[in-house]
């Protein structure tokens, strides 16, 4: 079955604007995680335009950071932003254009931390993709290394409303541009396929400019919905043990928030 993903990420500047508020929620978590684990070599899967990775460079430490993404436009935006960083920080970053289901990096087997943040796992639609991504990641970790996956905790009422039919139209956000030249309104409608466990989302972006002009475009995005036992089994079936599961970005237990953040660990070599 073909899935929709790429067109949602084509408007990179709009994407960055849309998720600037997310940074207030999750960046403190990732900073604390890096401080707690003190890794030497980090890989961010689905690194996008660098929202998390570039912030991570300002955490105390000298760890080497690699980012991987399948979208060339996102990586180009990451490189543009990286160019404004100090030379010593730029030197710590290596970016790769590759699929997280099938990558083979020069530093394979030496990463002590690999992260898959903010729902990006939801682009692994088929079982074959999911196992391929987890097994490839397992191979890239050093013994004792950790793999951290962050995704939303499914809301049954929300999904039920979208079950096999277009749901209500939701107003997701109203955002002012940094220069104040336009306001962007975001709306979604969703359909949930319970067999494939996939949300089929249509986003409507409406921009109202100070000049009086307006712009409207649609983009589609499909997201696989991971239920907690399913996600945990994926870790275990791929050879990981599970160190911890958090329910939000304040480190609360699973079920005490809207997230499921799983920390898996590759066993030490025997």
Image (cartoon, helix red, strand yellow):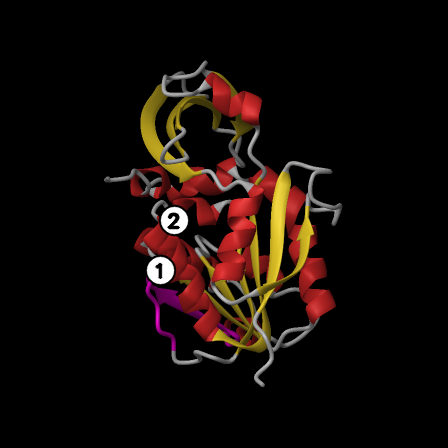
Outermost residue, left direction?
2
Task: Give the residue at mark 2.
Answer: 124
The quarter of the picture where the C terminus appears is: bottom right
Q: Residues within 10 Å of mark 2 (few under 14, many from 20)?
A: many
Front residue (pair 167, 131) = 131
Look at the image and say whether residue 87 sits in the magenta stretch. Answer: no
Front residue (pair 263, 178) = 263
| Residue 150, horizontal then vertical, whole percent | 57, 49
The quarter of the picture where the N terminus appears is: top left
Q: CA distance from mark 2 to mark 1?
A: 8 Å
Q: Residue at x 42, y 66 (%)?
A: 135
Task: Give the residue at mark 1.
Answer: 101
| Residue 174, horizontal then vertical, whole percent | 54, 24
Q: Is residue 172 in sight in this rendering?
A: no
Q: Quadrant of residue 76?
A: bottom left
Q: Is residue 226 above or below residue 131?
A: above
Q: Which residues are magenta?
A: 91-105
Q: Residue at x 44, y 74 (%)?
A: 139
Q: Quadrant of residue 166?
A: top left
Asked if the residue at tag 1 contacts the one at tag 2, i.e. Cβ–Cβ closer than 8 Å, the answer is: yes
Secondary structure beneath label 2: loop
Residue 143 placement, left or right of 169? right
Secondary structure beneath label 1: loop
Mark nearer the N terminus (2 vs 1): 1
Q: Tell me the number on the disc at residue 86.
A: none
Q: Is residue 12 above or below residue 163?
A: below
Q: Is residue 79 above or below residue 246?
A: below
Outermost residue, bottom direction?
270
Q: Residues within 10 Å of mark 1 (few under 14, many from 20)?
A: some
| Residue 147, horizontal then vertical, whole percent | 56, 63
Q: Residue at x 44, y 57 (%)?
A: 78
| Residue 252, horizontal then vertical, whole percent | 75, 45
């Amino acid at each position: 079955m073909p899935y929709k993903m790429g067109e949602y990420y084509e408007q990179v500047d709009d994407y960055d604007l849309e998720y600037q508020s997310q940074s207030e929620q999750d960046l403190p978590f990732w900073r604390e995680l890096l401080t707690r684990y003190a890794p030497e070599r980090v890989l961010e899967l689905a690194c996008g335009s660098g929202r998390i990775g570039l912030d991570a460079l300002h955490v105390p430490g000298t760890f080497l950071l690699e980012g991987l993404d399948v979208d060339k436009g996102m990586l180009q935006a990451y490189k543009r932003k990286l160019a404004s960083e100090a030379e010593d920080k730029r030197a710590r970053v290596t970016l790769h254009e590759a699929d997280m289901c099938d990558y083979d990096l020069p530093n394979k087997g030496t990463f002590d931390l690999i992260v898959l943040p903010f729902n990006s796992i939801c682009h692994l639609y088929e079982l074959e993709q999911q196992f391929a991504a987890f097994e490839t990641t397992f191979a890239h970790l050093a013994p004792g290394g950790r793999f951290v996956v962050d995704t939303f905790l499914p809301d049954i009422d929300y999904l039920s409303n979208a079950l096999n039919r277009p749901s209500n139209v939701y107003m997701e956000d109203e955002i002012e541009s940094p220069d104040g030249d336009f306001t962007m309104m975001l709306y979604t409608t969703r359909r949930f396929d319970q067999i494939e466990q996939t949300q089929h989302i249509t986003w409507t972006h409406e921009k109202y400019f100070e000049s009086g002009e307006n712009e409207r475009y649609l983009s589609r995005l499909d997201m696989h919905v991971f239920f907690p036992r399913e996600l945990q089994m994926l870790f275990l079936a791929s050879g990981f043990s599970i160190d911890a599961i958090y329910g939000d970005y304040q480190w609360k237990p699973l079920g005490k928030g809207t997230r499921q953040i799983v920390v898996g660990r590759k066993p030490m070599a025997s």
